[in-house]
Image (cartoon, coloured by chain):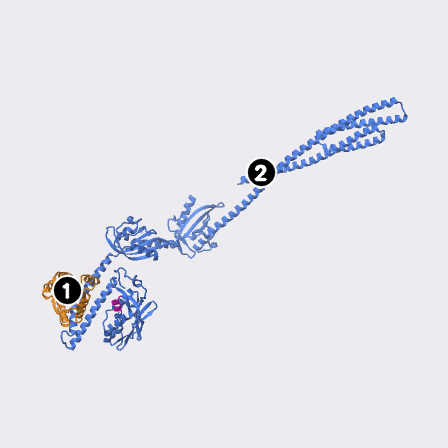
Chain colours: A orange, B blue
Amino acid sequence: MVGIPTLNRILSVDDEADIREVLGMALREVGGFEVVMCGSGAEAIEQVPVFRPDLILLDARMPQMDGPLTLEALRRLPHTATTPVIFLTAKVGIDDLERYGRLGVVGIVTKPFDPMLISEQITRTWRRYHEGR
Amino acid sequence: MKAVYLAAWIVIGGFLIWSGNLLLNIQALWSESSELHVLRANLDNLAGAWRDLSRPGNDVLENYAVDRQRAAFAAYEARYERVYDALLAQVGGRRELESFVRALTLEWRILTDRAQEILDLAADRERLRLAKGAPEEIHARETRSAVKMARMDRAFQNGLDVLLRANELVNRGEQSVEGMQRSNFRRLYVMLLVALIASALSVELVRRTIHQREALRGVVARIHAIVNNVVDGIVTVDERGCIESINPTACAMFGYAPEEVVGQKFIRLLDPSCRGRYLGQVKTGWARGGAYLAANSLGCEALGRRSDGTSFPMELAASRVVVDGQWLLIHIVRDITERRRADEKLRLAASVFENTTEGIMITDAAGIIQSVNPAFTTITQYRADEVIGKSPRVLRSDRQEPGFYEQMWASIRKSGQWQGEIWNRRKSGEVYPQWLTVSAIKDGQGRVTNYVGVTWDISELKASDRVKEEFVATVSHELRTPLTSVLGSLGLIVGGVAGEVPERVERLVRIAYDNSERLVRLINDILDVEKMGAGKMRLSFQSLELVPLVREAAESNRAFAEQCGVSIVVRETDEDIHVVGDADRLAQVLTNLLSNAAKFSHAGDCVEVSVRRRRAAVRIAVTDHGPGIPKEIRPRVFEKFVQADASDTRRQGGTGLGLSIAKLIVEQHGGCLDFESIPGVRTTFTVDLPEFRPGMRIDQLVGDREPLEGPRHRKTA
């Protein structure tokens, strides 16, 4: 059995600049991750080949290219075809959660999140993902 | 009838006369017969005397004791005379016999004359013999004697012939009498037969007469009983308009005793407003004859007047009859107060049926539509004549799950009612949701006679529900996005990530952070309530061991309790208790109860938790020793946004939705959430849940607790 790889690089996509700032600080300062924050799906697609993230945090609801569309596009890229993705969403309706779950993401984090706990939460999901493989 | 009786009496009279004559005849024949009998005896006697007489003649010739002979002859003669007299008396009126008797008497006279001559000759011969006379003389006398003897013999013979003929005549007479008597007896027999039949007929006639009388008496009694017990009032009125008789129903109706009104004017029983009309009608009716006042033909409302002066609506009809040659008006009166009320109720019901906005459909017991109201036609777009006589199937859409209608009818048959949401199809083809209540209508014997379906078109309601849901979802999302930034920023400051901040700033930031969290809880709770109200709360049922769940909840709330200066103690637990439930939701309930208990406890107090078996249920009890729940709030504790408003105890802001959510969750688990509060002593909230025991299936406990229209629960073992 291969050991669980260390989670280092996280690419996060969110159209809200404030959230990008808070989330970025929380992941870097509290979680100690290497983080790239993108403001849109298109930007993420550009960044991915360069940054090569271990995990992607994707806001589900964004203008123009929303979470599911971005995910679809990322899956077509060789670097992120299998990269684990966590949805970040303010929509907590059962229907939404089920729909996102069906898209093949490894976890869903609901907004508002606790900046002091989100890194731990992501790490837990990462571990569970690799343990289940 | 009278003619029949007259004829009967004539027949009976004739019969009696005839039979009287017959009896007299029989009696006469009887006496004649006995007379003939005596006659025969006398004739026999006469024949004896005749024969005896013939012998003395010989004796006279043989013996010459003339004197002796003469004496004997005289005796015979006397005897003949006697018999002859008797005979004459007997044959009186019988001419033929009389002539014989007379002929016989003639012969007798001849005989007696010859005998006298012979006797005289014998006496001469004796004298000659004694005187020894000449033989010639003797011979001459003997010759004369012999001639006389021969004549006497002839007379004797003639007499015998006459007697024989008379005897024959008597025989014939006797035969004739016997024949007549036989004929009479035959008549007598016929008479007795007729009398017997007549008696039998008479007995039958009498019996029938008695029977008819009894029947008549029965009819009279029955008519009396009917008149006295009939539900209608019956009042008979004579030609002067005075009451002649009144039955008990009418007495009760008008409030009089019979003796108070009999002989009084009938119009006393009518309200003054209709007396004039009544009299007018009677006048024309009387002139026309027959039924002179048909029901409801008064031309105005017939009102009766009671003895207390109050009036009441009634139905009045009258007809004219002749009883014992006397004209009578028979009035039939009926109090229709109750009927008026019932009519009014019916009118009201019909008005509701016509004007309500709910669609109403009435079917017969076989489910065939009998009647629909205007609202029904508006909702379904079908005209009444397009659905009446048809099955409600014409309204069916294909939106219902298979077996839906079978279940619906099973429920109606079982409980007599069903209600729920159902998708139907309008005439235009549009499928729409409606709320339907179907009720079975039963008769006195409990047999279903009709079904009534009441429907509300809930498409607009549904649309507005959808808008509301979307609004709530959108608002909660839109609130969450800025809150994420606020809470994230404050969280980083409070967590020290943003570096050191002055103490006063940190205190203020903490306040902002706590209230942001409270805002998030409020949004979450509103969403929960919304989801439960719409039946969209999904519970993941599985078998859970309860005590570890309770301990975990106590543990996770301990930090919060400690902030309030309160400790949580789990005690009095029965081990190995399982329930079927959603672990997250049950934890939510326990968190709510524990945080409430901590919030409302005094610093230094202890919140106690216990888990105990109670028969088939399990009880989780959370007890605090705070001030208790004010009396005025108790009935509304589980309502939304109700909070005990003791400012000093509101150390942590609640949303006011926690308990109502907890109650909904417990109820979705088939359980019951309740409380008991003794102000200043303790308040205990209890959660009772059905215990899941070995051998049970999960769906036994949760199978029928699906929300009305929500998706199915996920059932996991």
Q: Quadrant of residue B486?
A: bottom left
Mark 1 nearby-residue class (10 Å; few <14, some 14–19, many ≥20):
some
| x and y percentages locating residue B410 in the rendered image | 33, 56
Q: Is residue B585 magenta?
A: yes
**Residue highlighted by disc 2:** B11
Using the image as rendered, state which of residue A122 and residue B122 is in the foreground. A122
**Residue highlighted by disc 1:** A83
Using the image as rendered, state which of residue B7 and residue A16 is in the foreground. A16
Q: Residue furthest top?
A: B136
Look at the numbered disc 1 and give the secondary structure of its residue.
Answer: loop
B335, above or below B538, in the image: above
Using the image as rendered, state which of residue B355 and residue A104 is in the foreground. A104
Amino acid of disc 2:
Val
Q: Residue furthest front?
A: A1
B398, above or below A56, in the image: above
Check the residue under mark 2 and report the chain it is in.
B
Q: Are marks 2 and 1 in contact (CB under 8 Å)?
A: no
* Magenta region, residue range: B582-589
| x and y percentages locating residue B548 in the rendered image | 27, 71
Amino acid of disc 1:
Thr
What is the chief secondary structure element of the magenta stretch? helix
Are discs 2 and 1 located on one and the same chain?
Answer: no
Q: Give the position of the C terminus of chain B as an image quadrant.
A: bottom left
Mark 2 nearby-residue class (10 Å; few <14, some 14–19, many ≥20):
few
Check the residue under mark 1 and report the chain it is in.
A
| x and y percentages locating residue B618 in the rendered image | 32, 68
Q: Quadrant of residue B118?
A: top right
Residue at mark 2 to residue at mark 1: CA–CA distance: 138 Å
Q: Is residue A77 magenta?
A: no
